[in-house]
Amino acid sequence: MKKKHGVIGLIAVMMLTLLAACGKSGNSEGGASPSQAAVSESPSASASASSSESPSGNGGGAKKKFAIIFKNTGNPYGEKMMEGFKKAIEEVGGEAILKAPDQPTAEAQIQMIEELISQKVDSIAIAANDPDALQPALEKAMNAGIKVLSLDSAVNAASRLVHVNQADPERIGRTLIQGVSEMIGGEGEIAILSATSQATNQNTWIEWMKKELEDPKYSKIKLVKVAYGDDLRDKSVSETEALLKSYPNLKGIIAPTTVGIAAAGKVLTDKGLKGKVQLTGLGLPSEMAEYIESGVCQWMYLWNPIDVGYLSGYVADGLVKGTLTGKVGEKITAGTLGEKVVVQDGDGTQIMLGDPFKFDASNITEWKSVY
Ligand code: RAM
């Protein structure tokens, strides 16, 4: 794919998109809570709620610069996450720098990290395209005094001070297999349509899906393929089409990516496969409402991406102020989200947002205008 914009043009486009999103975001609906919750109480739109808190500011000096790098452009999930990040940074009186490369590669993110080091930003939050490849660049940033955290898709423990995790990966992976199994009556071929093959978050969820599948109760379910649509719409469409062609008996698709599940929803709709091939995964209500309403996807899961970004903004601020260092047991008050605690995560530490939430025909209308 060709690079379409220069970096400056790209940022301008993203800012405009974010402004537009802010304008129509469901802030006033932020307090709405779905009437039932199979996985969690509520997807928590608290960061969307208007805040009357006064900014803590930076002591009247120059504004601190907080950068966020998402995986790639063209993904409304990433735009919502950056919207939440920007909101938090504005609340603490800082300047938010929103970035994402055209392509979801580690190389493109490394280039952005180098630029941010030269700009002497105070913090970098990154949704990583690779768990290990960013390490030299992020270590360089940390050695220059920049506070580094990952969010959504983690970097390894040596490359960050802390990770902001959207939800428990084990719960996400196991829930998705339980969901597809119920949809296909516990029998038949299934496939996974993922993002990139190096994405930390998707790969962790897929590991847990495979562990769940080891349970003998799934002995009649066969995972035939993990395909990668790279969080690019066209590639996700063609990978879905390829799955349907290669596996004519396919009974279900799990897409643990908002881009993938929306692409698969479109392909199944266009090919009239509703009811023949089931679809579930992690989807953005605004993109999936039509497929949930039509029954192509009976249900799916997600958390509030605005909140993931918002929490990360407060974590970045804590790291810059020094009220947070990323050690287990430390606490942070993350604006409207309230208090969050740092916990262990393998060799590193993390702060967890909450639980995945189940979206289905009964609640999708309430959420499709929020994110
Ligand atoms: C896509 C991205 C993102 C992931 C969601 C579920 O938008 O891959 O990283 O968290 O899906």
Image (cartoon, rainbow, N blue to C red):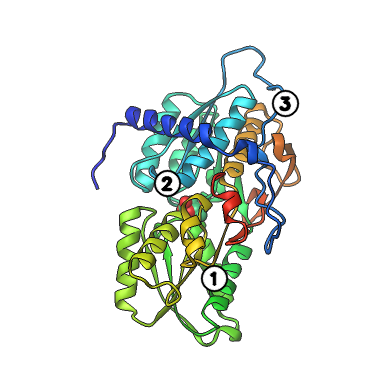
* Residue at 35%, 54% in the rendered image: 233
Look at label 2 and name its amino acid. Asn
In the depicted structure, whether residue 330 falls above or below residue 8: below
Q: Give the mark nearest the N terminus, 2 or 1.
A: 2
Task: Give the position of the C terminus as an image quadrant.
Answer: top right
Q: Secondary structure at mark 2?
A: loop
The residue pinned by badge 2 equals: 75
Q: Quadrant of residue 13?
A: top left
Q: Give the mark nearest the N terminus, 3 or 2.
A: 3
Figure disc tally: 3
Look at label 3 and name its amino acid. Glu
Contact between marks 3 and 1 (CB within 8 A): the answer is no
* Residue at 61%, 31% in the rendered image: 88
Q: Residue furthest top?
A: 60
Look at label 1 and name its amino acid. Met
Dot 2: few (<14), some (14–19), or many (≥20) neighbours within 10 Å? some
- Depth check: give the residue in front, 365 or 52: 365
Q: At which x and y percent is residue 353? A: 66, 48
In the rendered structure, find residue 209 and report the number of the disc placed on it: 1
The residue pinned by badge 3 equals: 53
Dot 1: few (<14), some (14–19), or many (≥20) neighbours within 10 Å? many
Residue 57 visible (yes or no)? yes
Between the residue at mark 2 and the residue at mark 1, the CA separation in whole angstroms equals: 24 Å
Q: Give the mark nearest the N terminus, 3 or 1.
A: 3
In the rendered structure, find residue 163 and report the number of the disc placed on it: none
In the depicted structure, whether residue 115 falls above or below residue 299: above
Q: Comparing marks 2 and 1, which lies closer to the viewer?
A: 2
Q: Secondary structure at mark 1?
A: helix
Dot 3: few (<14), some (14–19), or many (≥20) neighbours within 10 Å? few
Residue 5 in the figure: left or right of residue 35: left
Q: At which x and y percent is residue 21? A: 49, 36
- Depth check: give the residue in front, 161 or 19: 19
